[in-house]
Amino acid sequence: MKSFTVREVNAVAEVLLNGGVAIIPTDTVYGIAARVADAEAVARLFAIKRRPHTVALPVFVENLEGIVDAGGRLPVSAQTLAHAFWPGALTLVIPALASMAERVGSSTGTIGFRLPDDDFVQELVVRTGPLAVTSANEHGEPPMTSPEQVRSAFATADIDAWVDGGIREGVVSTVVACRDDGYEILRSGALDHDTIASAFR
C-alpha cells in the first residue's frame, strides 16, 4: 500500500478539523470521512452519499479509549474481540450515548466502532479524534477500490479533500453486536464465525 508523509496526513486532518468531508483510503475500500463530533460535517456526509439518516454510520477510533471518548460503552465481549482482532476488519456494535448514536443515524442506541489496519487512517484519527466513515459509493451501490472509481462517482460532490491511496482490495469488515451477555454476528466479512468464536476460547 502507498505510504504517506506526516505533511500529507496533517493536511487531511486540518480539513477535517475545520468541518470538511474527505474521501480517504482504508484497509478495505475507499471511504468518506467526517469528524463524528461535528454534527454539520456528519450531515454533509449523509447527503454526499445519499444515505438515509436511518442507516447508521460506522466510527473509526484510534484505540478502545477512543470509543469511550465518542460516547460508547464497552461490554466485556467487545473488549475481548478488540484485543484479539484490532487493528483489523472488525466492526464492534456497542451501546453509546443517545445523542451521539442519533448523530450517526442509529435509532437503536448503538454505534459500530472500528480500528482499521492502515497506517494512514490510524495517524489521521490520532489527529482528528473519532471519524464517521462509510464506504465511498452512493448508498446501495458497491464499494469502490480505486481512486479513479471514486473521482468519477463523486466528481460533482461537495468533497473538501481527496486522498489517493492506490488500489484497495480488502474484504469488508465483519460486524459484531456486543452485549454484556455475549455477541451476535450481524454481517460476515473478513473474519468468519469460527475466527470470532476463537477469541472466547
Image (spheres, rainbow, N blue to C red):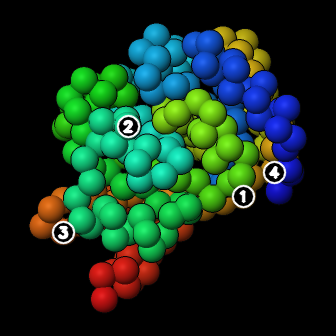
Quadrant (top left/top right/bottom left/bottom right) for the N terminus? bottom right
Which of the numbered marks, if any, corresponds to residue 167?
4
Residue at 56%, 61% in the rendered image: 87
Mark 2, secondary structure of its residue: helix
**Residue 147 as seen in the image, left or right of residue 117:** right
Res. 90 visible in picture = yes
Mark 1, secondary structure of its residue: loop
Looking at the image, tell me whether mark 4 or mark 3 is earlier in sequence order: 4
**Residue 66 as seen in the image, left or right of residue 15:** left
Mark 4, secondary structure of its residue: loop
* Crowd band around label 1 with a 10 angstrom C-alpha radius: few (<14), some (14–19), many (20+): some
Q: Is residue 37 above or below residue 114?
A: above
Looking at the image, tell me whether mark 2 or mark 3 is earlier in sequence order: 2
Q: CA distance from mark 4 to mark 1?
A: 6 Å
Looking at the image, tell me whether mark 1 or mark 2 is earlier in sequence order: 2
- Residue beneath label 1, please? 169
- x, y (%) of residue 30? 67, 41
Q: CA distance from mark 4 to mark 3?
A: 36 Å
Q: Amino acid at mark 3?
A: Gly
Of marks 1 and 3, the one in the foreground: 3
- x, y (%) of residue 65? 41, 48
Q: Nearer the viewer, residue 69 or 28?
A: 69
Q: Are marks 2 and 3 in contact (CB under 8 Å)?
A: no
* Crowd band around label 2 with a 10 angstrom C-alpha radius: few (<14), some (14–19), many (20+): few
Q: Amino acid at mark 1?
A: Glu
Q: Residue furthest left?
A: 181
Quadrant (top left/top right/bottom left/bottom right) for the C terminus? bottom left
- x, y (%) of residue 191? 48, 71
- Residue beneath label 3, please? 182
